[in-house]
Image (cartoon, helix red, strand yellow):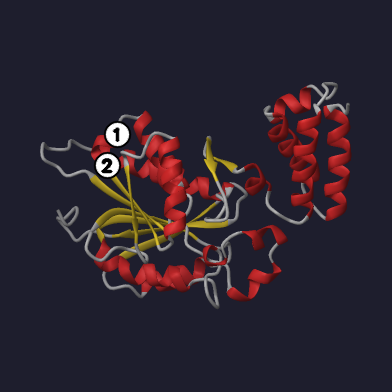
Amino acid sequence: MATIGELLTTGTARLRASGSESARLDAELLLGWAIGAERTAVIAHSEWPAGADAALTYGAALVRREAGEPVAYIRGLKEFHGLAFSVDGRALIPRPETEVLVSEAEREVARRLTSGPRPPGTPPLRVIDVGTGSGAIAIALASLLRKRRMLPEVTILAVDSSADALGLALENAVAHAVADAVVFAQSDLLPPDDLPFDIVLANLPYIPSGDIDGLPVAASFEPRAALDGGPDGLTLVRRLLEALPTSLARGGLALLEIGFDQGPAVEAATASLPGPWSCRIQPDLSGRPRLAHLERVPAPGRSGWR
């Protein structure tokens, strides 16, 4: 019977030969999944026997990974902002760089709720996650706000044009016990009859169409519609920007994930919007420009539309 260490060695070699740039990590994650243990246990106990059934499961997983299928799809889950999300071909796999968007959204909600007294009868802050996919952004934010006991003062709407993606998002919301805190709805970008919002969050497709086929093979397993942002990658982003003057409350904030080289184009598009706006680009955890902060500057003496 093969040991964990032996399976790791052979699996790493196979994945490296297939072109994986993270062969050892992939092998550790897949073997941990196959034997039902954390990756740390796999690393710490290389002398343990793996078991025949686990070895077979691991072998089948290696075949799928050698063909380019993402580890997250093989395991059926992806860690994001400290939570484990179910993932499959219905939606994009959550990326680590998107965690910055969630952290900034939490910070902004907290700032708005604690910066001054909220008189009785003040309506909840209205937050929308546009293009929610697996629901990672909305669910992670709801989980954070629940821990801080802020959910009663916040409503979260998560929308997507894909009914399949919304089904996956709802499954994740139930799994993380926030299905009562997030409303899911099918919509092409912003719903026209549910305005305005205080905070708009969006991780829309932003990869130029011509670059899609040049992505790593793993991306070919994800829905193309969740990646393809049109000729310059900003087709949907521009549509959302054009909708902000009628959908974002005065003093409201939009947080949009963009490509690392798209900051100047987003700043230019923001400058063309009617009324005063501010725009700044924040780097992600690797230091690359990634998150656009767009604020609708309130008129003098006005803090919002309500």
Query: Residue pushed farthest front?
Result: 53
The front one of 285 and 75 is 75
- Disc 2 marks which residue? 154
* Residue beneath the point at 31% across and 29% down: 149
* Residue beneath the point at 86% across and 47% down: 14
Q: Residue 267 occupies which quadrant of the picture?
A: bottom left
**Number of the label disc, if any, that sits on residue 305:** none
Query: Residue pushed farthest bottom?
Result: 231
- Tell me whether the residue at label 2 lies in contact with that at label 1, contact meaning CB atoms closer than 8 angstroms: yes
Give the distance between the C-alpha atoms of the residues marked 2 and 1, in whole angstroms. 7 Å
Please determine whether, in this image, residue 55 is positioned above or below residue 212: above
Q: Total of numbered circles in the picture?
A: 2
Report the quarter where the N terminus lies: top right
- Judged from the image, the secondary structure of the residue bearing numbered disc 2 is strand
What amino acid is found at the position of numbered circle 1 in the picture? Met
Q: Residues within 10 Å of mark 1 (few under 14, many from 20)?
A: some
* Residue beneath the point at 43% across and 73% down: 268
- Disc 1 marks which residue? 150
- Judged from the image, the secondary structure of the residue bearing numbered disc 1 is loop
What amino acid is found at the position of numbered circle 2 in the picture? Val
The front one of 25 and 253 is 25
Is residue 145 in sight in this rendering?
yes
* Residue beneath the point at 82% across and 28% down: 4
Residue 242: image location, x then y, percent: 34, 72
Please determine whether, in this image, residue 138 is positioned above or below residue 237: above
Please determine whether, in this image, residue 13 is positioned above or below residue 51: below
